[in-house]
Every structure is written in C-alpha cells, then in structure tokens.
C-alpha cells in the first residue's frame, strides 16, 4: 500500500511514454532508409574528392550513419598519409 | 481507375474510396483518383508508424491528408497506457479531422447492417456523424475528445485497483 502510494506520488514511467519513444525512433529509421549500394557510392565519391587534396589510405576509410533519438549523423574516418602539393592537384587531374 | 473515378464524379457529390491497408498496388490504385485523403490510425506504435509512411507517400503525390484517430480508449489514455491523440498528432504533425472512441456498438451494427450514425447512444456513431459534417463543408466544427466515464463508484474502484 505504502509502495503504491509512493509510486503514485512520484510516478513511474507510463507505458505511453515508452510507446512514444519507440515510435519516434522507428520514424527516424524509416526516414533514413538507405541502401548499402548508396552508401558505397557515397563513400567512393567522398574518397575521390578527398584524394584531390590528400593522400589517404583508401582501405582504412570508414563511413557510418548513426541514429539516435533526436538526430542522426554521418561520420567519415580516414587516416591521412600526407597532403598533396597544390601543383600536384592539377597533375593528378 | 482514373477513368472510373471521372465517371463517378459526374454522378455523385462524394465518392469515398476505401484504400486497403499497406502501401502496395491497392494503395496506388485508390490514390490515383483521389482529391483528398483521410489517413486512419489507431493509437498504437505499429499503426502510427504505417500512417507516417502513408502520409509521406501522399505528400509525394501532392495530396494533403487529414488524420483520423480510431479506437481511442479514454480510460487507458487517462492512465497513461495509451497514446493520446495529442501524442499522435505531435509525432505525425498533420491536421486532425476527427477522433473516434472504441465502441462495441460498431461490431453490433456491422452484424445487423444498421447504420451506427442513427444510434444516438453510440459515441463512435456520433463521432462519425461529426466527421461527416466536417467533410460536408462544416470544417470548423470543434473536434470532441473522447472522455472517460466518471461515476463516483467507478473512480473509487479505479483508485483501489491502481494501488494494488
């Protein structure tokens, strides 16, 4: 009885709050539905652009899409081996 | 389907196209002839999620849908065990056209084939009626929020039950 009163006063999480949280998360996923093919194309394009300015280890590049409750983010991790000299940019092209 | 709708247009003031659940060909078929759309969902996670997809698809076809929340159980909403219509609207962010409470009389009326709207005691029937009035040009008719029954003894029993 006392425990019940306690819970009543301070309130436990209601199941609708859980439903709302789950729903919002599901909708973020639905809106960000991207295929693996799209991700690998994007990675290729990004690598091409970065390679104009830096020499990077193409094998070690990692592209991630992270989703959480309120936002989603695109993260690219790449080791840079060295910078290209500016005149070399034209050579490379 | 488009041509068929054009034929019906000449004959009737309103044509209601019942769209099958899901986003398959049935959906495409019923949407192609429509000017307006009402998306119906229940206050459950899976239903609201599907509604969000359908709303997205309708926007892509430049149809502005309105939302109808069906089968609301006011007692559960009050207890916090069911998403309220505010929660649903908050998540989907579209305009409401009506709220329909859970009503056993719906099943009875489909059994007998009698119109629920003619039953003045049925809350769902009255909600249908108001939605129909809104569709028929009375767009500003206020939306009634289903309320839980509150007798003294019911309230008393409810509280006892919760403290178990």
Image (tube, coloured by chain):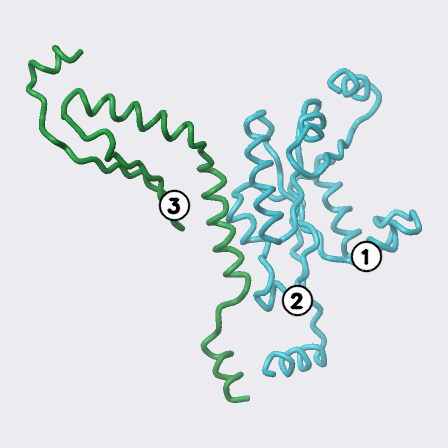
Chain colours: A green, B cyan
Q: Mark 3 lies on which chain?
A: A
- Residue A67 badge: 3
Circles 2 and 3 in contact, beta carbons < 8 Å: no
List x then y, in percent, for residue B18: 75, 35
Q: Name the residue under label 1.
A: B122
Circles 3 and 1 in contact, beta carbons < 8 Å: no
> Quadrant of the image for the C terminus of chain A?
top left
Q: How far apart are marks 3 and 1 (CA)?
A: 45 Å
In the drawing, does residue B57 fall left or right of residue B116? left
Q: Residue at x 67, y 82 (%)?
A: B156
Q: In which quarter of the image is residue B105?
A: bottom right
Q: Name the residue under label 2.
A: B75
Front-most of residues A2 and B23: B23
Question: How crowded is the residue under tag 3: few (<14 C-alpha within 10 Å), some, or many (20+)?
Answer: some
Task: Judge depth for marks 2 and 3 and give the one in front.
Answer: 3
Front-most of residues B74 and B127: B74
């Amino acid at each position: 009885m006392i425990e019940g009163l306690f819970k009543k006063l301070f309130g436990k999480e209601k199941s609708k709050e859980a439903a709302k949280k789950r729903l919002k998360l599901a909708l973020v996923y639905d809106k960000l539905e991207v295929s693996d093919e799209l991700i690998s194309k994007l990675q290729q394009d990004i690598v091409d652009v970065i390679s104009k300015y830096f020499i990077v280890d193409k094998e070690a590049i990692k592209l991630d899409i992270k989703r959480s409750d309120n936002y989603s983010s695109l993260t690219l991790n790449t080791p840079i081996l060295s910078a290209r000299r500016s005149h070399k940019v034209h050579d490379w092209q | 389907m488009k041509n068929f709708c054009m034929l019906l247009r000449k004959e009737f003031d309103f044509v209601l196209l019942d769209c099958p659940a899901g986003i398959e060909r049935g959906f495409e078929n019923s949407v192609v002839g429509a000017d307006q759309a009402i998306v119906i969902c229940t206050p459950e996670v899976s239903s609201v999620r599907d509604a969000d997809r359908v709303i997205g698809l309708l926007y892509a076809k430049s149809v502005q849908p309105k939302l109808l929340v069906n089968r609301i159980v006011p007692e559960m909403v009050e207890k916090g065990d069911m998403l309220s219509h505010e929660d649903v609207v908050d998540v989907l962010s579209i305009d409401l056209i009506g709220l329909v409470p859970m009503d056993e009389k719906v099943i009875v009326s489909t059994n007998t084939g009698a119109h629920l709207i003619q039953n003045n005691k049925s809350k769902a029937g009255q909600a249908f009626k108001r939605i129909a009035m809104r569709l028929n040009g009375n767009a500003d008719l206020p939306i009634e929020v289903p309320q839980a029954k509150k007798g003294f003894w019911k309230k008393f029993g409810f509280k006892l039950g919760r403290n178990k």
